[in-house]
Structure formats: C-alpha cells, structure tokens
Image: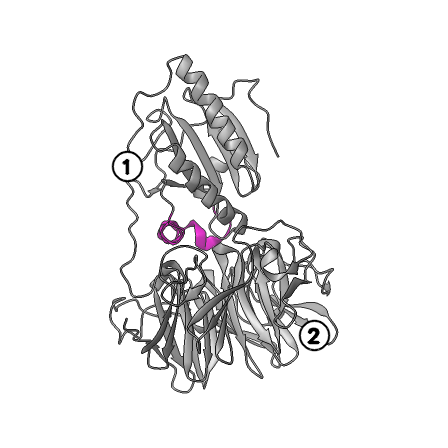
C-alpha cells in the first residue's frame, strides 16, 4: 500500500541507539545522515519477495554511489532464527548485500515506521522527513523518481550534504572451498552439488574427489562448455541418466548439464523474473520466478517455483512448461492441485507416484498424489505457526525447512532454521530429530575435514543414498555425510 505523505510533514523516528548493526563499522543515526537521502528496506531474509528486491536496490546503489544517498536494510525478522545477529550476517554475506543493515529487535523500528508487510521501502529526505513508504516488489521506477525529485529539490535549497558519507563494509566473502552450497543429488556413486555463491555446480565421487566443475564462476546466463557456462546462485539439482537439471535460481531459469558432451543448455527462462501469474508456454520464451528445486519423473521435470508459490512442470519431449500445482496465493490450503494454496515451495522430491515438497513460509511438509491429483499437508499449520517440536506429526513444529528426501518408510527433512535433520515416520505417526538440537558440541573447526561434532548451520538439503544421508550444511560451507548404520557424522573432503 502506498502512503502519499508528501503533503504532510512526518518526522522519521530516530534509530534506537542500542540496536546492533551489520556490515558497518559503527552505528548510524538520522542525525549522522542529515543531508542525505535515506532509503530504508524493511526485509527478512526468508522472504522471496525481499530477495527479489535486493537486485533492484543493488542497481540503484550503484547509480547513486557518488551522491548523498544512503541505502539501509532494516532486518525485521519473521522467524525466531532470523532474530540472531550472526544469522543475519550470514544472510548479508549470502546475498552479497553491500549496504549496512540494522538489526530491528522485536520489530521496534518496523512499528515506529508503521510497516505492515515485507518488503517495504521507506525514503527519508535530507531534513529527516519521511516522504515515501510502499510495500511489495517492483518499485524500482518509483524509488528512482522519488530520489531524483528529492535530490533536485534539496540541491536548490542547499540542504544536501556536500560529500556523501563513507560507510565501510565489514562482511567479507568466505574463502572456503564451497560457498553456501544449496542442494544435492546423488546417483551412480556421484554427487551433484550446487555451489551457489560460487555460481557453479560441482560433481564429485562419494569420497569427495572432484570429477567436474560446471560453470566459470562468473555471474551470468551463458550456455556452452563447462568452463564457459555461467550461472547465478543456482539451487536445486537432480540427476537423470547422464544429465543434471539445475534450478538456476537468480537467473530465473531451468538449465541442463550434459556430462557426456561437456555442455550446458538453458531449457526454460529468459533470464528475467516472470510475473506472479503465468500460464506457461515454450521453454525459453517463458519468464519464470525463482525456481528453487527440481525433481524428475520419467520425462517430466517438476520445479519448486518459490517466486510464484507453485509447483511447475517441464516436459522434456515437448519443450513446454506450465504450472502444475498451486493457484499462486500464499497459504497452506489443501485441495485439488490447481486449487491448493502453497507458500514458497523450496524443496521437492518424488517417490513412487507422490511428489513431496516443503513449503518454507508455512514451515510445512506436503505431498501431491499423482493419481488423485490432490495436495495434502503432512506436517505444518500456517504462515506464522513455526517452532521446534518432536512427537506426533499433527503436533510437530518445523521452522522454514528448505529440503527433503523420501525413502519407503521415512521422510528426511532439512529443517533449515532449526539447524536440524528431522525424520517423519508416517507409519508410526511420529517426528523425531536425527541430527541437531540435542546438545551437539561445537568444538571442531570448519576447516578440519575430520570434524564430526560441528553443529549443522542452516542446512538447505538432505539426500539419502546407500544408507547414508548427504547434507548441504549451507552456512558452514560444507557437505556432511551421516551414516545411518553407525550414527557417525562426517564432513565430505572436497578438494578443488
């Protein structure tokens, strides 16, 4: 909702001086920033709409980099896990955010500014007056126009700062072998890993020996040989014979890796984010929105389309893609597949004639019966019903889960914001914690390949293969291997 407040004087409230800041060496204040145009982005790092806004802000930051314009993130958390400063620091690093971020404790700043939805942009003029506030995606032109008008007005009145303030970034890139690995797929003794922030896909054997590196590491949407191809923070990967299908998330594309011919091809997507509603069409002619994971059955690729709150399907033979489940409304409502409400599906897995998926924003695990075409919730309760609780399935609580896999009797869930691997046993009507949240120590180092006691840190995926679980331990920048027979957790020794 847009608040037209240019016609009245609304003094922006000062930032609480005791609150923590991320990505700046010292706290900021409105007084310190007087003479600057201040653009506030109220966000929370789980939110797909917030993720869609970040590239727009990055583009505008570059445009106004030599002018008295300051961009500030106000992180007003939805989930418990997102309230922790160190977790926010990880999110800032993961999304390569260049501006400072205020940790909005208990949503105090959110309430002072009268915010009611993520993301919301608020703009403050050089005199400290709130002149713009609007929620939702797609505000680039309005933000740009507002900044330009303010700069012109205050240039005439000589109320602009003479020199833009210098704010030193404090978040540094990780030097680990992997950078925020997102998803895993295992087949024929080979592991495909989306090395998301290195913008590539890596294939190893079961010992961690690297067999293929797919992608130059540069951000882009480029097909071709492995050394020339470019991705942008890919997430989901899945094997089909000698091919790997990839959810190239921030390119808004579905890609195919051909290991026999050393070649990457774009199957779906234009490279631009698609609209909220779309009926689909022919592969490269269709714009899609934040594909987060992929699964294959026969000649169909199913896509967890986080940005549309839907599951999509791509037919390999016809080159056609379209929505398969979800009406685009964000909620947790069961029903026939196209009438059901989903909420940012972020992990997908097919077992027999059932599609299993995790809806991260409702912290739920759900299924689609391919015979009856019905969407049913297995665990989960609502958009703001989350936590950590084992026991009966109907009483269990998860927190923004991003990945899963299924065997004959069990569903293994990467319960991301609980930094745990949980197990759903439908036969025994139970949920239990397999790894995490039960007193594991944190005594070993991240760079120690023999480490077997380090806690998981926001794991984004889990896959079963030959009585072992392969886990994308995302914020630890490593792959973990849990032996279900011996209960030993180890780190996969990947050498590049």
Chief SS of the magenta region = helix
Q: Is residue 16 above or below residue 390?
A: above
Q: Are marks 1 and 2 in contact (CB under 8 Å)?
A: no
Please check the rendered image and state whether residue 107 is part of the magenta-colored stretch, yes or no: no
Nearest the viewer among 232 and 413 is 232
Numbered marks: total: 2
In-image side of 372 versus 479 (left or right): right
Q: Is residue 349 shown to the viewer in this render?
A: no
Task: Bin the neighbour count of mark 2 within 10 Å (Cα to Cα): few under 14, some 14-19, many 20 and up.
Answer: few
**In whole angstroms, how far apart are the C-alphas of marks 1 and 2?**
55 Å
Numbered disc 1: secondary structure: loop
Where is mark 1, residue-wise? Answer: 26
Q: Residue at x 36, y 39 (%)?
A: 19
The disc placed on residue 218 is none
**Residue 370, which numbered label?**
2
Q: Position of residue 268 (x, y in %)?
A: 57, 61
Estimate the x, y position of residue 149 in percent, counting from the top left: 49, 22
Ranked by sequence position, the earlier of labels 1 and 2 is 1
Is residue 84 on the magenta stretch? yes
Mark 1, mark 2: which one is toward the viewer?
Answer: 2
Instruction: Please give the name of the residue rendered at 51% of the width and 81% of the height, measured from the top-left corner.
Output: 241
Q: In the image, which residues are magenta?
A: 77-96
Give the vertical position of 391 relative to 171 (above or below).
Answer: below
- Which quarter of the image is occupied by the N terminus? top right
């Amino acid at each position: 909702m847009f608040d037209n407040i240019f016609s009245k004087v609304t003094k922006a409230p000062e930032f609480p001086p005791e609150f923590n800041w991320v990505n700046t060496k010292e706290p900021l204040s409105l007084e310190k920033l007087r003479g600057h145009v201040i653009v506030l982005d109220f966000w929370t790092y789980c939110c797909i709409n917030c993720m869609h806004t970040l590239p727009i802000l990055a583009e505008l930051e570059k445009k106004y980099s030599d002018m008295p314009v300051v961009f500030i993130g106000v992180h007003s958390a939805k989930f418990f896990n997102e309230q922790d400063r160190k977790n926010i620091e990880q999110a800032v690093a993961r999304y390569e955010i260049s501006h400072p971020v205020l940790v909005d404790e208990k949503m105090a700043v959110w309430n002072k500014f009268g915010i009611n939805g993520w993301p919301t942009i608020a703009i403050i003029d050089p005199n400290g007056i709130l002149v713009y506030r609007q929620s939702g995606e797609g505000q680039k032109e309005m933000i740009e126009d507002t900044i330009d008008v303010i700069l012109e007005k205050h240039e005439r009145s000589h109320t602009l700062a003479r020199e833009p303030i210098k704010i030193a970034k404090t978040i540094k890139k990780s030097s680990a072998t992997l950078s925020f690995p997102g998803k895993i797929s295992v087949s024929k003794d080979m592991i495909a890993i989306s090395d998301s922030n290195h913008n590539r896909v890596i294939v190893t054997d079961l010992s961690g020996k690297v067999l293929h590196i797919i992608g130059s590491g540069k951000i882009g949407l480029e097909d071709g040989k492995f050394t020339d191809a470019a991705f942008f923070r890919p997430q989901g990967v899945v094997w089909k014979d000698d091919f790997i299908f990839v959810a190239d998330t921030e390119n808004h594309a579905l890609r195919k890796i051909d290991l026999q011919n050393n070649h990457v091809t774009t199957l779906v997507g234009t490279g631009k984010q698609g609209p909220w509603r779309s009926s689909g069409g022919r592969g490269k002619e269709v714009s899609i929105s934040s594909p987060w994971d992929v699964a294959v059955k026969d000649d169909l690729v199913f896509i967890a389309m986080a940005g549309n709150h839907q599951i999509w399907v791509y037919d390999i033979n016809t080159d056609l893609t379209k929505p398969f489940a979800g009406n685009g409304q964000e909620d947790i409502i069961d029903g026939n597949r196209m009438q059901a409400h989903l909420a940012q599906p972020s992990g997908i897995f097919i077992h027999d004639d059932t599609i299993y998926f995790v809806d991260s924003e409702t912290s739920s695990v759900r299924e689609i019966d391919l015979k009856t075409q019905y969407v049913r919730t297995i665990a989960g309760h609502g958009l703001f019903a989350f936590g950590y609780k084992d026991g009966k399935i109907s009483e269990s609580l998860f927190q923004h889960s991003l990945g899963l896999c299924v065997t004959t009797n069990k569903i293994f869930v990467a319960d991301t914001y609980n930094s745990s691997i949980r197990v759903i046993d439908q036969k025994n009507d139970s949920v239990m914690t397999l790894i995490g949240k039960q007193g594991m120590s944190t005594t070993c180092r991240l760079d120690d390949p023999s480490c077997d006691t380090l806690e998981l840190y926001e794991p984004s995926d889990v896959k079963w293969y030959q009585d072992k679980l392969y886990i994308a331990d995302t914020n630890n920048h490593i792959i973990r291997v849990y032996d279900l027979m011996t209960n030993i957790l180890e780190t996969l020794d990947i050498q590049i």
